[in-house]
Image (spheres, grey):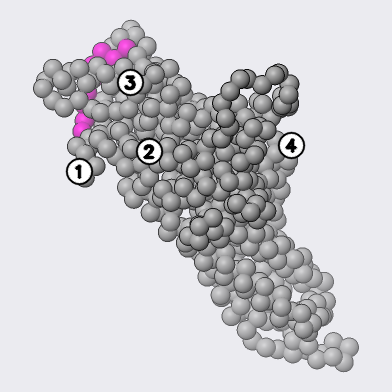
Amino acid sequence: MTKSHNYFTSSIGKKQIMALTGFGLVGFTMAHLLGNLLIFLGADAFNMYAYTLTSNPLIYVAEAGLVAMFVLHLVLAVFLKIENSSARPQAYYVKKKTGRGETFASVTMPYTGLVILVFIVLHLMNFKYGTHYTTMIDGLEVRDIFRTVVEYFANPLYVAWYVFAMIALGIHTSHGFQSMFQSWGVNHPKYTPTIHFVSLAYGLTVASGFSILAIYCHLLN
Amino acid sequence: MSNKDMTIHLKVWRQKDRKDAGRFEDYTIPNVSKDMSFLEMLDVLNEKLVLDSKEPIAFDHDCREGICGSCSLMINGQAHGPEKATTSCQLHMRSFSDDDTIVVEPWRARAFPVLKDLMTDRSSFDKVIASGGFVSVNTGNAQDANTMTVSKENADLAMDAAACIGCGACVASCPNASAMLFASAKISQMALLPQGKVEAAQRASEMVKTMDEEGFGNCTNHAECEASCPKEINLSNIARMNREFFKSKIFSKKG
């Protein structure tokens, strides 16, 4: 093994790390969705959940891990995109899909990824670092994140942008989810069709789950 | 309509040499038989060009029976044309209709520079093979039958992978010009058999390294390669290569 070609700079190494970080992000997204479902139970349940989560000192470790995964996923994506574009300097005059390979989701990965990046920055600004209200639950002063969220979604334009971004996230993950199995060498005639189905179901769940929550919050106003 | 009176319009990529910028030229060929192969149709055109004292169109071809991997045409934006599991030489004019315009381009990838017209230099594939696509055994008498057992399942999978003719349609059709389907078939055909297992780790490591050095793109799991492959090499070979490569890097001393 020469120094210039180690696991991390190899084509396969990069895509496996892409898959691994994607796996972490997919797991986080699902946990985030499940936690957010507490919005349906009302302000106290959601605020208490947010308080419990953020008052645990381990949250900083988790956040650092999340940021690391996200940054790695993003940096690798940029490298891969640049390398892949330069692998074909002259484009085809006519290029037709076979219809049995590329999907809308697989082709739009860089673009849906970009939407998610913009979304996450705005999302953190609006909620995590958004207006800080407080409320009392059983004599304990906690942040009223529920109010911040509901107030934000009063604007239908914000709801529309949120739903758009969640559809992008759903499309992105519907390719990414099954893709990470292939990258890690899991391809089996028995299980691959199931993995593809779960991948679509995951994308659909994430897109519709978050969107329904946003619309619900809008209706609370 | 009789079999013999199709008129075909061609838009063919003409490029003098490696350095030439290249351009499309239009040709109209009358009386094209539906029973002609695509390459025979090009032969007819070339004969006419020669008679007219013009430079014939250069394109790779050899066996013309779909097993050598020489022919390599991007036909109407699809590697080897519109038919599934068919090389350009096995593609027949019955796949087209009268008065069709067909665009013919060479494979386009940094690792496959155009030499002339529709011919590309695919020696990067040879380099990938030379870096590990072999089994280092001493030749000698054949072993007694059954001294080395191979399961039927693995024998079939190895044979399926060995069906790769190295034409480069996978690279040509991949949006990233990645050679993973080719490399994975060549790694798989040996990794599946006991004779190949001995050097499996080193082979995976070296062949992937050469593939990366030759300037092929990265795989993003579109599966356009599998869909375009005239030999229907399965995507599961890429998954096997991913496993073999990871194993070679993490567990092997030599990787």
What is the distance, in whole Å, between disc 1 and disc 2 at their CAs? Answer: 20 Å
Q: Nearer the viewer, mark 2 or mark 3?
A: 2
What is the distance, in whole Å, between disc 4 and disc 1 at their CAs? Answer: 50 Å
Answer with left or right where residue B48 lies relative to residue A88: left
Task: Please check whether the numbered discs 4 and 3 fall on a single chain.
Answer: no
Amino acid residing under circle 1: Asp
Q: Chain of mark 3?
A: B
Vertical comparison of B15 with A176: above or below: above
User: Quick one: label 3, few (<14), some, or many (20+) residues within 10 Å?
Assistant: many
Q: Nearer the viewer, mark 1 or mark 3?
A: 1
Q: Residue A135 versus residue B185: which sits nearer the camera? A: B185
What is the distance, in whole Å, between disc 4 and disc 3 at their CAs? Answer: 40 Å
Among numbered discs 1 and 3, the one appearing first in the sequence: 1
Overall secondary structure of the magenta section: strand
* Disc number for residue B20: 1
Q: Look at mark 2 in the image and give the residue it sits on.
A: B123
Residue at x-position 67% and y-position 68%: A214
Q: Nearer the viewer, mark 2 or mark 4?
A: 2
Look at the numbered discs 1 and 2 and tell me whether their residues touch, using CB distance below 8 Å: no
